[in-house]
Image (cartoon, rainbow, N blue to C red):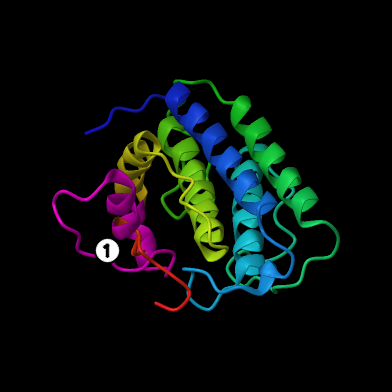
Amino acid sequence: MTTITGTNAITLLAAAHTALRTAVAGVPAGGWDLPTPCEHWNVTQVLQHATGDQIGFAAAITGGPWPSEDPFQPSGSIEGDATALLEQALSASAAAFATVPADAEQVPVPLPQGPLPLWIAAGAAALDAAVHAWDIAVATGRPSPLTAQDSRQLLTVARQIVEPLRAYGAYAPELTVAGDTDPTAELLAYLGRRADWTPSA
């Protein structure tokens, strides 16, 4: 099992934020309405969900402000620049986690589990950002932004938080994969996603 510290988790969060920025920056003109691996959500809605979640993680630590829109019922309509919306959310998340000591054991999170150690709390925010970066990238015909190393760490985090969240519909049931599957495909399968997803699949 991959070992993660609070410091590792903050680095992982930064990498996930970069992946999400890159994925959003690469959405082509007219690409915001494309379908994604998130069933019933298009690229715009996935972005809204992802930004709402990052603001939620920040707000749990700082006390607010909370997302102005329900991340689980994204409207699909963004007023203003999508990149600016994303940057606001990622900056808030990074700034909030930067205030938390690396060895903190009780970090508030917007999850039903309640406060968690920093490595899990920051890892959960990283998991959310990274997987939605993957959603947007593959929906717009680009390669996965997830590295094998990051996927291994994200899977370690996922195994700490995902099972209780399946009951809320936050993640689909785990998929079965071959034993020699690469780390990213293993992570995606655990989260109920197919690594070979295409819009027509």
Q: Name the residue under label 1.
A: 174
Q: Where is residue 46 in the image (x, y as percent from the top left)?
A: 59, 64
The amino acid at mark 1 is Glu
Q: Nearer the viewer, residue 97 or 44?
A: 44
Left or right for 29, reference 12: right
Q: In this view, does 62 lie above or below 159?
A: above
Asked if residue 170 is among those painted magenta in the image, a careful observer would answer yes
Q: Nearer the viewer, residue 127 or 141?
A: 141
Which image quadrant: the N terminus? Answer: top left
Residues drawn in magenta: 162-189
Q: Is residue 135 above or below residue 15?
A: below
For image coordinates 64% across by 42% down, the residue present is 58
Classify mark 1: residues with Cα within 10 Å, few (<14), some (14-19) or many (20+).
Answer: some
Q: Where is residue 178 in the image (x, y as percent from the top left)?
A: 15, 57
Q: Nearer the viewer, residue 153 or 21?
A: 21
Asked if residue 173 is among those painted magenta in the image, a careful observer would answer yes
For image coordinates 62% across by 50% down, the residue present is 56
> Residue at the right extreme?
80
Q: Where is residue 192 in the image (x, y as percent from the top left)?
A: 33, 64
For image coordinates 52% across by 44% down, the residue present is 125
For image coordinates 35% across by 28% down, the residue present is 4
Q: Nearer the viewer, residue 67 or 151?
A: 151
Left or right for 182, reference 188: left
Q: Position of residue 77 (x, y in %)?
A: 76, 72
Left or right for 187, reference 57: left
Q: Is mark 1 on a helix, strand or loop?
A: loop
